[in-house]
Image (spheres, grey):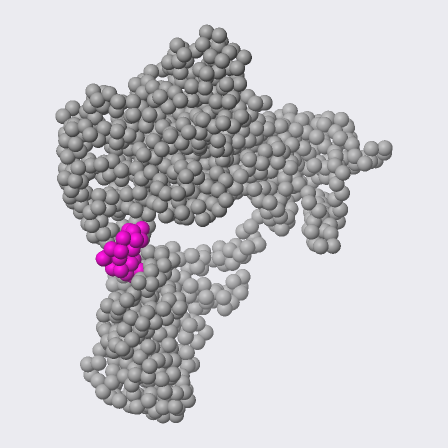
Amino acid sequence: MGGTDRELRLRPAPDLYFRDPTTGLDLALLRVVTDAGGVAAPAPWVLFHDDLRDGDRVWVRGHPEGMFRSGQSVQLDYQGPSSRDPDGPGLLERFWGPPIGGGYSGSAILNKRTGAVSGMLCTSDHSGSVHALSATALLSRCPQQVQELHKSAARAVSSRVSGGVSDVEQPWLSTLTDDQLQSGGWAFPSRRLRGYLAAAARAAESHPYPGVAPGNVSPPLSTVYVSQHAHSIQTLTRPGKPDTGERVSAPTIIDNHMDALAVGGPGAGKSSLLRSFVRECVAGWGDAWARGEGDKGAGGSGGRDVEQSAPQSPGARPDPTPLLVPVYVQAADLVPDRPLAEALEAGVRADAGRYGPLEAWSAEFFRGPPAAHASWLVLVDGLDELLASEQRQVVLTRLAGVRAADPEGTMYRCVIATRPVPELPTSRSPVWRAAVFDLLPFDTRQLRDFAERWLSALGLPDPECAAEQFTLQFGERRREALVRVPLMATMLCQLFADQPKPPLPTTRHEVYRSFIGLLQSRQYSDAASGIIAQAAGAAAKYGTTAVRTVERLPAQVVGLAGELALAWLDGEKLSAGELFAARTEDQRPPELPERVWREILRETFRRSGLFTERGGDLVFIHQTLLEFLAAQRVAEDPRRADAELRNVFGRWGTRPPEEWRRHDSFTRFLIAAVTDRPLLGRALWRCGKGWEGARFIAELVADGIPVAPKSMRRCADTLAAAAKMPECTGFFRRELAQHLRTLGDDRDARILTAVATDPMVSDDDRIMAARTLGALRGSGYTESLLSIAADTDVGLLARVETMQRILEGLDDSSHGRQLLAIVADPVFHDGLRRDVVNALRSADPRGCTELFFSYAQDPELGQNARALALRELATVGDPRAPALLLALAGESTADSTLRYELMRILRSTDADRYAELLASYGADSDLDPGTRVTALGELAHTGDERAADLLASLATELDADPVGGERVQTTRLRVAEQLAQLNDPRADELFTTLAGDMSVAAPIRLGAAHELQATGNASAADIYVALAADRVLDEHARVVAAQALTEAEPGGHSPRLTAILVQLVIDPEMPETARDEAFRLLDRYVAGVHSFQDPRNSHRPRPAEGVLELLTRVANDGNYSRLQRAWAAKAMRNLPHLRRLREGPASWDPALDRPGGTGQTRTRLPDL
């Protein structure tokens, strides 16, 4: 291969050789020669792109005669299109450059602007002018097979570029410059974008997970992160819309084409979620470019498969879902009044700048699309950390402006992760259309997985066993909610690793207090790498006083951090470094330079585990640590504490906290620290009368904050009443039940039962409510499971799992009837049915036979359920089973599959007496006629000669029944069908009698006529004629009879058939739907009679002519009504075959309608 040391063997493909005899254009295709194992030598695909512009410089490599036969390159300039044939449909592309000749024909033309092959050289005048066939024109003139091969190749290339498919390699795009990628519209990251993606991936992996104590190595995000679930709720712009959301996986948030808002409480994993989105988006670009960057972290697992096609023209892309390039920023970056691109540049510089030291991503980088068919995904963190409401409004207003300027999200899409803040649900919020998701706590599986990952990262010898011990400590009602929050689980894992033996803290504020105590204890490590040893070493040359001073600094970290937290909460603008230096200025020894002192302070606080670096300053590693420390400082001042409580509950302590306050960590930490204040007790009692305040109190109890018993009782009554509100959704009712469970109120079981049995509630909510009931051993558990299993709208897997749960706890047969009715559904497998029957036998060994007998006779049970009960009766040899089996098989609504199964069961009961049993049932006039014909039909299948006479006798009895009704008529038809199967001549007599009996229902008469036709009886056509003309019959039945007549009439046409079809079309009493059927039938009839003679024959077929003549006569005959004449005229005017019949042979040449007929055109190839 030119320019490489690789060898590629090719051979001609004769089956794909193409030549146009008119123009002389020929095309010879080559195949890659495979090795002995049938594997072709790997080679990159050539990428086509037709975008040629005046002045484009192209590169051609040919093999001219002479010393450069092995290959010579030429550069040409594009001049525009040319055409040799003014009548030709296509154009040639003209180029100008050095004269070239033989040896260049068929060479690929590489466009240096787009980096793509734009066509194939075909002609030259040897003086500088060259013409070429464009890539699209070339492919359009190839055989269809070649075009399909090219499409497959393009799909394979684009999958490799964007989806990470491992079996296709395409290095072509990685060699293009940034300008070529942009000009060509390739959905591939440029060199600059590849560097950015690599840095963003490294920054995401290095996310400072909150709660990593000093001495513990912060693990990469991918090592410990566990994907959460979210609850999809209504959009911000429609707060009154009913909650119709569902439980989804958190990655679904970025699959939404709208902007998205992820709402979660303190420590819910919002920052980690956004970082995981960064990894997800980077992985979506595949890892072909990552190998070239030398950064494996940029790929990762769990990438989203995004399939694209190679661009057919600039901007064309079949898949509307764009590739996403993540940009992680803090909300504070969007507050200053500057263009969005500059805000993104500042945010990226602070977050990922240190991971790409050789790169510089200016504001211009973020001002346009990141790549062709790609959008920026702006991930905004920390909206709730902005203290001023005006600042939060600025951020939301900016996002609303971005969406107004880019309504389709082609340039920017945005995701915000935040706690509930006052600005989100109010009418003052800007119009920002966003899908809203509520982040859910870990479930049991997620928690165990998370704990195992963390304990493994912390170096515990048996992390799986340790994770099991860890989760077992939180099985109690009030403690389980505590550990399911990701931040709390992280800190508890740290505490558990430090002290594996129980007990761990049981309340939220105790966890923070214990964890900060762990951080303090780690400050005093004797290791040479410890902060004290390191700080003392840095101060040693300034004297012993300096050493002793810096050794005392770790003991002051928590106190100074609390001062910083309160100052920031109060809105002070001091940086952490400035405040720490100001608070400790009087401690600095004179001989210790201020610069060194500040460096020691900074390093001491950075390594405390409370802080991390961002944008050149220290910030708290998590907002809740700031809030905890600030709350402790406030609690030390009673007057300040009461003032804060009045901010929460109103001046007189009478209002419940606002919605955003319920999730505010500072508020909860403060309440936990001042439980002895009388103002707090009065406020909690008063706000417990409203459901919002009651929820808040329940959440305080879940946090382990002591609340007066009378306030808890009042709160429980309020929550139970709220669960009965009609607008209360299933998800919300489950939340209320959980709050009641937290308060120790047993009404939670009744609420969960109501949710689980409500068909209007989502499947997920019903199933989760039932599972919770099972864990609580609630009384409504079994009823809830039965309700879910019986609901056919619930998914099959969920129904099967529910049935298995029921059977695991089944200890009596009280629910046997419901279980049989459910499991009789054909969607269930036989194994589950057997499990149900065995469980019922085990639950009532002595009375199970009578139980199944009662089920078999129960008219409220469906046929399949009764068949299950009968099978069990037959299995134990119950003598009552045969009659019940035949009775069920004889029911008119029983389908053939069920009848076959019932007969098989009957045969298995007594094989020796089977025929005698059937004959006796068939002759018993006291039995239902349906049961008798079923028995006789099965008797006929056994070959018993008595069957025919018994059937004929039964037919005579039925004919004598003057008031038998449709059931008896159906049985008469069944008798005749059974006789026909026995080739008994009496069958035709019965069919003829039924078809001509005007008292018999239309379907039965038609069925009888059809049976006559199937047996070859010549009278079938006459019967169809009578049925089609019978005005007593339903109009649709008459059309059906006419259609059957077109098949039964000899030759497929006749004057009487023509008259019947025309009469149906013009019948003024015909319903619209039946008339439409008659129109279509008449048109098919005319089309059918055409096929009897060559359509190019000058003589028209007489039957077709008869249709046209009859319709013409009706349309012009005044003896017919105006409506009849109108319908006749419409038939001639609108029915295609009749219209062609009127217009003459030339207009209805069938070649026009056939592929390859004269109606198609062929494109002439240019004369090259």
Q: Nearer the viewer, residue 837 or 427?
A: 837
Question: Percent x, y for residue 321?
Answer: 46, 39
433 on left or right of 1104 = left
Toward the front, the furthest residue is 544
Instruction: Name which residue lies at 39% across and 87% down.
Output: 911
Look at the image and tell me in which quarter the C terminus lies. Answer: top right
Picture quadrant where residue 757 is located: bottom left
903 on left or right of 173 = left
Q: Which of 1021 and 71 is in front in this view?
A: 71
Count the labels in the image: 0
Above/below status of 501 relative to 380: below
Q: Which of 398 and 71 is in front in this view?
A: 398
Q: Can residue 957 be seen in this view?
A: yes
363 on left or right of 333 = right
Instruction: Name which residue lies at 64% across and 37% down.
Output: 171
Q: Does the magenta stretch include residue 769?
A: yes
The range drawn in magenta is 768-790
Instruction: Name which residue lies at 35% across and 29% down.
Output: 624
Picture quadrant where residue 503 is located: top left
Q: Does the magenta stretch include residue 646?
A: no
Instruction: Name which residue lies at 29% across and 28% down.
Output: 666
Secondary structure predominantly adopted by residues drawn in magenta? helix
Above/below status of 339 relative to 952: above
Look at the image and tell me in which quarter the N terminus lies. Answer: top right
Question: Percent x, y for residue 922?
Answer: 30, 88
548 on left or right of 1077 = right
Toward the top, the furthest residue is 590
